[in-house]
Image (cartoon, rainbow, N blue to C red):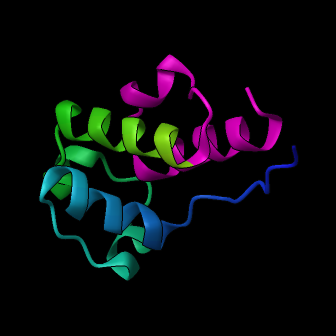
Amino acid sequence: MTTEVTQVTVEELAALMKQAAGVTVDPQDLASRADSTFAEFGLDSLGLLGIVGELENRHGVALPTDAERCKSPRAFLDLVNGALTTGA
């Protein structure tokens, strides 16, 4: 069985923030402020946990436990995309 590895984009993260946590963020704003904290966007740790769970379901891969502790969108995307690439 071959699974296609996809990278989580800023746009997808913004959509997940809306879906999983009810936080509406413009993807361009998220990209331009990728080093800002999730708290600055209104996302709390519970919301981030929901996003991690949704990504695990979508990709069929357990993400590192550090994913739910990431403080910024850039750190989260780097960690998640690294895990999806390596299958870890």
Residue 31: percent from the left, percent from the top?
45, 71
Residue 55: percent from the left, percent from the top?
47, 45
Q: Nearer the viewer, residue 12 or 57?
A: 57
Q: Nearer the viewer, residue 5 or 69?
A: 5
Magenta: main secondary structure: helix
Q: Is residue 21 magenta?
A: no
Q: Residue at x 57, y 26 (%)?
A: 62
Q: Residue at x 16, y 38 (%)?
A: 44
Q: Residue at x 38, y 35 (%)?
A: 53
Give, as a single range, the part of the protein colored magenta: 59-88
Outermost top residue: 65
Can you say whether 63 is above or below 84 in the image? above
Outermost right residue: 2
Residue 67: percent from the left, percent from the top?
47, 30
Q: Residue at x 57, y 22 (%)?
A: 64
- Please indicate whether residue 66 sits to the left or right of residue 19 in the image: right
Q: Nearer the viewer, residue 19 or 76?
A: 19
Can you say whether 58 is above or below 70 in the image? below
Outermost front residue: 1
